[in-house]
Image (cartoon, rainbow, N blue to C red):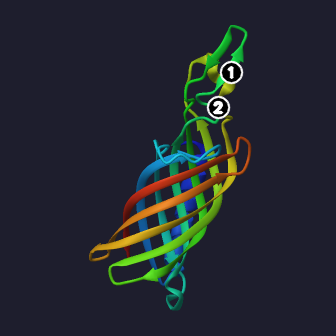
Amino acid sequence: MSNWKRLVFSSALGFALCGCALAQSWRVGAAYGRVNDVQDSLNLNGFHTYDVNGWVDFVPDQTLERLAIRATFGELKVKGSQGGDTVTTPGGPVTLPDLTDKIGYITIGSSYEFIEEDFYTSGIFGGIGGYRVKPQSVDPAFVPYQDPSQTVFGFHLGVDGSFHIVSRFNLIVRLQYHQIVEAPRRSLITADAGVVYRF
C-alpha cells in the first residue's frame, strides 16, 4: 500500500473512530456514478467515466440532527486535461489519446438536510480536502502530455435526495461539483446513486 493510501486510510479511520465516540448518531453511505468534465464547457452528454465514493456522517448534537459532519473518500476516473487535443510534433500534428487519470480523494466537510419528510429528505453538502492525481500508463511517446502525478487541494459542493426504502436503509441520488484548484485546474460534475444506512 502506498504512503498516500496509508495516510488516507489512517485519517479516515481515525476520524471515524473519534466521530463514533462523540456523535449522538451517525450514518454511512456509498455511491457510484458518472463524471462530466466541465472545465471548458458543460455538455449534458458528457457523463462518461466513473466516480465511486463512500462517506461517514456524524451528528454531534441531536438537537441539530439535520446538520452533520462528513468525511468522504473516493476515486474519480477522468480524461487527462490534454486528452484528445491535437498537438504539434516534429513529425506533424498528432491527436492525443484520452490520457486517463485516476483521482483519489478524501475530504472533510458538512451536510445539512433542509427538507425532511417521512419518506424523503433533501440536503446540501460540501467539503475541502486532498486530491491525488495518478495518470494511467500510456505509450512513452505521450508521457510528456500527461498530467503530473501529484496531490493537490480541492473542494466539492453538492445536493442530494434520499428516499426511505426499508428499516434504516435509504436510496440516495446526488449531484456534486468538484473543483481541483491547482494546475492543471479541473472542474468536474458527478451524478451518483447509492445507499445510506442510519445508525
Name the residue that disc number 1 marks.
87
- Where in the figure is residue 38, as x and y percent of width and height? 60, 47
- Where in the figure is residue 74, as x and y percent of width and height? 51, 53
Name the residue that disc number 2 marks.
82
Give the residue displayed 74% in from the left and 42% down from the top: 183
Amino acid type for the residue under numbered disc 1 = Val
Tell me the quadrant of the picture where the C terminus can be found. bottom left
Of 162 and 72, which appears nearest the observer?
162
Q: Residues within 10 Å of mark 1 (few under 14, many from 20)?
A: few
- Where in the figure is residue 45, as x and y percent of width and height? 47, 44
> What's the mark number on residue 185?
none
Measured along the vertical axis of the image, is residue 46 above or below residue 156?
A: above
Of 71 and 180, which appears nearest the observer?
180
Q: Earlier in the sequence, mark 2 or mark 1?
A: 2
Asked which quadrant contains residue 150, the reply is top right
Amino acid type for the residue under numbered disc 2 = Gln
Label 2 and label 1: CA atoms lie apart by: 9 Å
